[in-house]
Amino acid sequence: MKGEILKTILITGGAGFIGVNAAKYFLEKGWRVIIVDDLSRKGSDVNLMWLLSECPPKDYPLRCVMLDIVDKGGYFLNKLMQDTQPDVILHAAAQVAVTSSVSSPMHDFKVNALGTLNVLEAARLSCKNPIFIFTSTNKVYGGMEQEIIDEYDNRYAFYDGELKLGIPETYPLDFHSPYGCSKGAADQYVRDYHRIYGLRTVVFRQSCIYGERQFGIVDQGWVAYLTARAMLDMPITIYGNGKQVRDILFMSDLCRAFYQAIEHIGKTAGQIYNIGGGPGNITSVVDFIRLLGKKLGKTIDYSFSDWRPGDQKIYISCIGKARNDLGWFPETDMGDGIDKMIHWTKDNLDLLRNNM
Ligand SMILES: NC(=O)c1ccc[n+]([C@@H]2O[C@H](COP(=O)([O-])OP(=O)(O)OC[C@H]3O[C@@H](n4cnc5c(N)ncnc54)[C@H](O)[C@@H]3O)[C@@H](O)[C@H]2O)c1
């Protein structure tokens, strides 16, 4: 290591679920990591403490900066970027819940749209032309109501055979819900900063990501949330009829995708990728609960409530473009991923009880 120049990655939202896992991943690869977070998400303080104990700054090149990306028009963020000149920016800070975006659309817009513009501007004004990876969402495709959908006992399925391979990046955008609009606006800004300013941006439209260090709440992180509720014997409400289908991706696979996007930046700059578990890792909500019950050796009861705005009946990521350009595909099979999720949940039940 001596004499070697370290690469630096600055991770906004670096104390969140995705951020803290990515931070550990890059630290273990020998990178210098700068975390930016305002700790507004419940559980992020715990994640940060965990990272500091796993990778203490005396042994690892880790720096944590408490900072709101919206504050003072991004002044402090800009200053930090000028001082540190990261090679890569992973922008993961966000207001992440659809329901909160409906109750507080202005806050949602500020953090997700304006906040992203602040991070983009700070990146553009830094000297290194950093690589900029944005954690966008499948919600930019809206409810996809135009699709014909077959309904089975436990799940929906696309009628169109091609869509069974997943939704491609060329699928029409249709922002739905304030969260969909703010993330969608950010997604398009990030893409356009490549066209207009030549910034090396990459947009990941992520489906459902799950894994260790995820403090799921009722309106975000449903795999983690349901796992914890079931293990804590807490009541479970399903919004909609539970036949909604999603492809789910284990966190370590997402970290690898970030890395591969950086490694192949000649190809990935200016591109958008749908990133998820793909057709090989799909489940409906009720099927997931049944599988969870089987793994936990108990019957999990649940009740139903109204659908939530913009909720897709079925979403599967087409990961063909990512496979071609990044040489990436999910390695963690859904059953193994859920086992790991259960294991982590078991070890953290007290913490999770307080975060529900
Ligand atoms: N987890 C998923 O399944 C999923 C799916 C699609 C997209 N995403 C996107 O991935 C990103 C990370 O998601 P996550 O699941 O890790 O969420 P998370 O809530 O765990 O992490 C987000 C972090 O951002 C921080 N933050 C919020 N507002 C901030 C601000 N103004 N300034 C600085 N920090 C701020 C929070 O404290 C939190 O630590 C988000 O952009 C989210 O929209 C996540």
Image: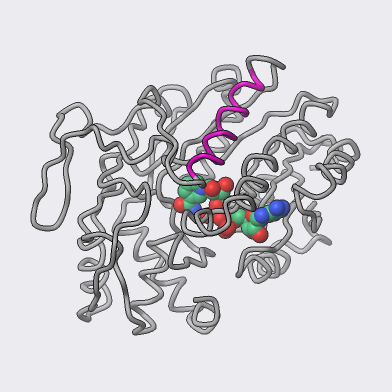
Q: Position of residue 183 (x, y in %)?
A: 54, 40
Q: x, y (%) of residue 130?
A: 74, 28
Q: Residue at x 46, y 71 (%)?
A: 344
Residue 339: percent from left, percent from top: 35, 66
Indicate whether residue 183 is drawn in magenta.
Answer: yes
Q: Nearer the viewer, residue 118 or 258?
A: 118
Residue 48, by quadrant, is bottom right
State left or right for residue 54 relative to residue 156. right
Query: Which picture quadrant has residue 264?
Result: top right
Say if residue 83 shows up in the picture.
Answer: yes
Range covered by the magenta-colored residues: 180-194
From the viewer's perspective, tell me whether residue 206 is left or right of residue 9. Answer: left
- Is 226 positioned to the left or the right of 327 in the image? left
User: Residue 109, how many percent across, how many down?
Assistant: 62, 45
Q: Quadrant of residue 91?
A: top right
- Tell me the residue at 85%/25% (across/down): 127
At horizontal 38% and vertical 38% (from top left) the residue drawn is 142
Q: Residue at x 11, y 42 (%)?
A: 150
